[in-house]
Image: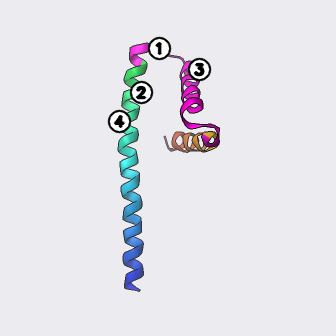
Amino acid sequence: MKKDIILEEYTRMQTLAGVLNESEQSDELSKEIDKSISKIDDNMSYVDFAHAVANILKSEYGSHLYGKFIDELKSKISDL
């Protein structure tokens, strides 16, 4: 019984550590993206931004991840 509780807690902590690391990377990336957008065009339209993201998805990630990307994006936007 005690082993199960320890294992559950360990698993929860591992998951939390992964989320925190991912969040730290995401925060840094979003700051860099924002800086880049400001350098290119302070008033960039959402259409241009969406096209740029689509180009990156196509060239760097592949179509097998499009659905997962959109799902994650919707999830993060609904958290705001």
| Residue bearing mark 2 | 33
Which residue occupies the foreground of this view, 45 or 24?
24
Where is the N terminus found, in terms of image quarters? Answer: bottom left
How far separated are the C-alphas under marks 4 and 2? 9 Å
Of the residues shown, which amino acid type is indicated by label 4? Glu
Please state the extent of the stretch shown in magenta in the rendering: 38-65
Q: Position of residue 9 (x, y in %)?
A: 38, 71
Q: Dot 1 surroundings within 10 Å: few (below 14), some, or many (20 or more)?
A: few
Q: Position of residue 49 (x, y in %)?
A: 53, 22
The numbered disc on residue 47 is 3
Element marked by disc 1: loop
Sequence-first tag of 2 and 1: 2
Q: Position of residue 60 (x, y in %)?
A: 53, 33
Asked where in the image residue 10 lies, by quadrant, the reply is bottom left
How far separated are the C-alphas under marks 2 and 3? 16 Å
Of the residues shown, which amino acid type is indicated by label 3? Val
Which residue occupies the foreground of this view, 32 or 77?
32
Q: State the residue at coordinates (37%, 38%).
A: 27
The numbered disc on residue 43 is 1
Numbered disc total: 4
| Residue bearing mark 4 | 28
Cβ atoms at labels 2 and 1 below 8 Å apart:
no
